[in-house]
Image (tube, helix red, strand yellow):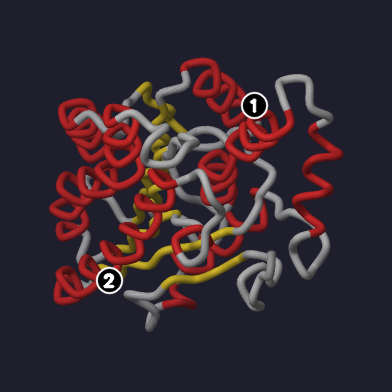
Amino acid sequence: MGEFKDKIAVVTGTTGIGKAVTLNLARSGARVFALGIDVKANKALQELSTSEGLEVLVLDTDAANPEAVRTAFEKAAGLVGGIDIIVNAAAVHPYGDATETSFDAFMRCMAVNVGSIHLTAQFGVPEMRKRGGGVIINLSSVQGHACQSGVSAYVASKGAIHSMTRAMALDFAADRIRVVCVSPGSVRTPILELAARTFEGQDADIDAVFSRFGAAHPLGRIGEPEEVADLVAFLASEKAAFITGSDHRIDGGLTAGIGVR
């Protein structure tokens, strides 16, 4: 059935990387609860999963809302008796520097990108303890290491994820819970399409812009969500049993060199 047979996973985010992770884990035998705020995307993911005969239940959930996350975890754990894997992929990406980004937009970014990780741990770790351990994987970004201009809120959130991952890894190691993060470069997702339209206009040729984005990566292309999902699946597996507290870049070599403008 697959290496994740009998494993229970919760994934936040139902588009892009979150969608790819949900399908990857479910196709490898996991029962997955996918939490997303985009109702249209949620419906599409549920229909695709059902058509493949996968054990996926998509729950309409704002991952930055404490009561919504509590309810989702109570439902998931109540149905299956615990949680083994949490993948935090929910994210928003406002643009602008500190003078252009409203405080509300900044705080919403922090709430979704960082606060949701706190919430899934708050309600998920007790369920992992019941199963004797687990794995938490947080989606960060290369922009937590080296950033472009005009994205101050987003990079603040992604840098925070790196630090939070290290803290959680130490806090929960005695519970046999591993915590790692993944930092992708440019990946073909709705967030990257937003970037293309932000910089090139609403009528931008998305494929052409993605090609240009890809040229900035030494491997000469952008990544695919499925490639990130494969890395997530490895980190969630027993093959990665001695890995915790670390960040794993999947960026086509983007941050291997020094950029000069």
| Left or right relative to 156: residue 95 | right
Q: Position of residue 139 (x, y in %)?
A: 44, 54
Q: Residue at x 15, y 57 (%)?
A: 130
Please name the amino acid that badge 1 sits on. Answer: Ser
In front here: 161 or 151? 151
State the residue position of label 2: 166
Q: Position of residue 1 (x, y in %)?
A: 57, 55
Residue extending furthest bottom? 242
Query: Dot 2: few (<14), some (14–19), or many (≥20) neighbours within 10 Å?
Result: some
* Count of all numbered marks drawn on residues in the image: 2
Q: Which numbered circle lies on residue 51?
A: 1
- Secondary structure, mark 1, is helix
Q: How much space separates mark 1 and mark 2, taking CA atoms?
A: 38 Å
Q: Residue at x 53, y 50 (%)?
A: 149
Q: Vertical placement of 237 versus 70: above or below?
A: below
Please name the amino acid that badge 2 sits on. Answer: Arg
In front here: 110 or 66? 110
Query: Dot 1: few (<14), some (14–19), or many (≥20) neighbours within 10 Å?
Result: few
Q: Position of residue 135 (x, y in %)?
A: 33, 63
Q: Residue at x 21, y 49 (%)?
A: 118
- Secondary structure, mark 2, is helix
